[in-house]
Amino acid sequence: MSIKERVKNEVEIIVAKGHQVEHEVIVFIRQDYAETLNDLQVDMKIERELTLEYLEGVEEGLASAGHESGRLISKVAETLMEVSRDLGNKSVAAAEKAALETRNALNAALENTQGSMDSFVQKAEARMREAYARLIEVGEAGKARLTEVGEGIKAYVDRDKTEFADSVRQSLNNSAESAREFVQQLSQSTEAKSRELIELSRDKVSDWLKEMAEKIKP
């Protein structure tokens, strides 16, 4: 069963129950979309199509159950964008945490280091470079995902068969455009964290050398 069919079936079940339909649909989409992204480790190249599948699945599920879809579709689009944004933010936060843990572990190891200090610093710098590269990588992935979600929403709105009230169409377009804002926010966050990581790393290497100099003074 395709994702679209699964989403359609679930929405039909929610509408049939008739209890807080809009709320329950959004709760389902938020959880299911997040799980899909995590389970599939979605390739950025299919993010656009995945967004379309969710939107079309909700639309078809509502239509088959005779439920008005326009306003709710707009909320679903916003939810897809928010889930993608939150996933990007969490990934960056996790990468930053890993980098800081690496730095702290190296700091602790400094107290017990044996042998060449030069070798120790080289290893420390290599690990910090890896942590920095990972932080940049997840930031770029998050931005790419957000961009593709925005493109998916635009593609949904631009389909020939789609007929929406002007207000709904505008709301969907606004959700698509918000991708740019979210990308910028994620970019600024990643840049700030990576800049801080670099500065902390530089300062710590300098501290290591100063400490070692104190230890070997006659």
Image (cartoon, rainbow, N blue to C red):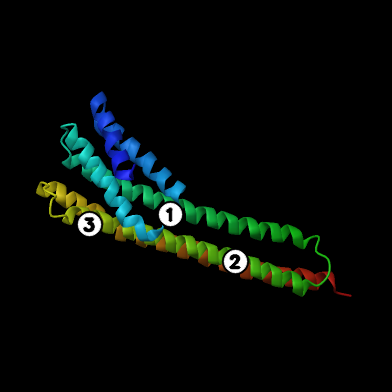
Q: CA distance from mark 3 to mark 2?
A: 36 Å
Label 2 Cα neighbours within 10 Å, binned few <14 / some 14-19 / many ≥20:
some
| Badge 3 vs badge 2, beta-carbon distance below 8 Å | no
Q: Secondary structure at mark 3?
A: helix
x and y percentages locating residue 62 in the rendered image: 20, 36
Q: CA distance from mark 2 to mark 1?
A: 19 Å
Is residue 178 something that shows in the picture?
no
Q: Amino acid at mark 2?
A: Glu
Quadrant for residue 177, please give it: bottom left
Quadrant for residue 59, please give it: top left
Q: Mark number for residue 130?
A: 2
Quadrant for residue 174, please give it: bottom left
**Of 176 and 107, which appears nearest the observer?**
176
Q: Secondary structure at mark 1?
A: helix
Residue annotated with mark 1: 88
Sequence-first tag of 1 and 3: 1
Residue annotated with mark 3: 154
Give the residue drawn at x 22%, y 45%. 74
Q: Amino acid at mark 1?
A: Gly
x and y percentages locating residue 5 in the rendered image: 29, 41
